[in-house]
């Protein structure tokens, strides 16, 4: 199954992601209030609304171009660390999707790998530090495992989303050693990471969109 056959489907998908982030704005902000700046949901909601406006105005763009616009817009509109991290992730994914108007499993794998590497490069972070990588790297591993088992793309995405959810739960069990949450030390235990949570919301929304598109 292709994620999307037409550019406007990609725009619809980006819109669905924006809706999900906006719907979870208060939840994400409450998570960030416990161990961060208390602005993750607010910042992300502002960013995705700006992205929605930009991509809707570019209906002829290919998926790579839309993702590049998404990344650049997030960098320019989302404050704190989230803007550069998410922006870099989308811009790296855009490189793997350059010129494409539909996606297959192998391309999505390349996009995920590029996005994760972008986050690592930008954030100088690694798995196990209570960051979005604790959701995204297990998600990527699950996606690849399902892809190698020749499962349909939507099944691969579902496996990735479930792994990301488990990753979010894992962040409750570890002490933050990266970002503002690291200032809390052991007091960060028991709190789930806002970035890992928003990453999982994003993945879950993509999966749900693709499942309904079948």
Image (spheres, rainbow, N blue to C red):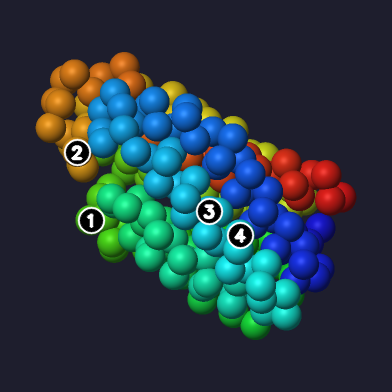
First reached walking from the N terminus: tag 3 or tag 1: 3
| Distance (Cα) linking label 3 and label 4 | 6 Å
First reached walking from the N terminus: tag 2 or tag 1: 1
Q: Of discs 3 and 2, which sits in the foreground?
A: 3
Residue at the disc numbered 2: 180
Rate crowding at label 4 as few (under 14), some (14 to 19) or many (20 or more) other CA atoms within 10 Å.
many
Rate crowding at label 2 as few (under 14), some (14 to 19) or many (20 or more) other CA atoms within 10 Å.
some
Residue at the disc numbered 1: 124
Rate crowding at label 3 as few (under 14), some (14 to 19) or many (20 or more) other CA atoms within 10 Å.
many
Residue at the disc numbered 4: 52
Residue at the disc numbered 3: 48
Look at the numbered disc 4 and give the secondary structure of its residue: helix
| Distance (Cα) linking label 2 and label 1 | 14 Å
Are the residues tagged 4 and 1 within 8 Å (C-beta)? no
Residue shown at 31% from the left, 17% from the top: 190
* Above-or-below relation of 69 to 20: below
Are the residues tagged 4 and 2 within 8 Å (C-beta)? no
First reached walking from the N terminus: tag 4 or tag 1: 4
């Amino acid at each position: 199954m292709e994620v999307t056959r037409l550019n406007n489907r990609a725009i619809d998908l980006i819109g669905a992601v924006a809706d999900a982030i906006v719907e979870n704005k208060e939840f994400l902000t409450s998570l960030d209030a416990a161990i961060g700046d208390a602005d993750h949901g607010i910042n992300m909601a502002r960013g995705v609304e700006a992205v929605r406006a930009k991509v809707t105005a570019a209906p002829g763009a290919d998926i790579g171009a839309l993702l590049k616009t998404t990344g650049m817009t997030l960098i320019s509109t989302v404050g704190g660390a989230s803007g550069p991290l998410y922006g870099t992730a989308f811009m790296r994914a855009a490189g793997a999707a350059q010129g494409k108007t539909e996606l297959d499993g192998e391309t999505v794998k390349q996009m995920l790998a590029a996005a994760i590497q972008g986050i690592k490069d930008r954030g100088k972070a690694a798995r196990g530090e209570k960051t979005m990588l604790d959701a995204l790297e297990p998600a990527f591993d699950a996606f690849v495992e399902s892809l190698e088992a020749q499962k349909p793309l939507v099944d691969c995405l579902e496996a990735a989303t479930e792994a990301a959810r488990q990753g979010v739960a894992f962040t409750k069990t570890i002490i933050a050693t990266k970002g503002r949450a690291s200032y809390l030390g052991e007091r960060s235990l028991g709190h789930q990471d806002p970035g890992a949570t928003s990453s999982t919301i994003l993945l879950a929304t993509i999966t749900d969109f693709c499942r309904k598109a079948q």
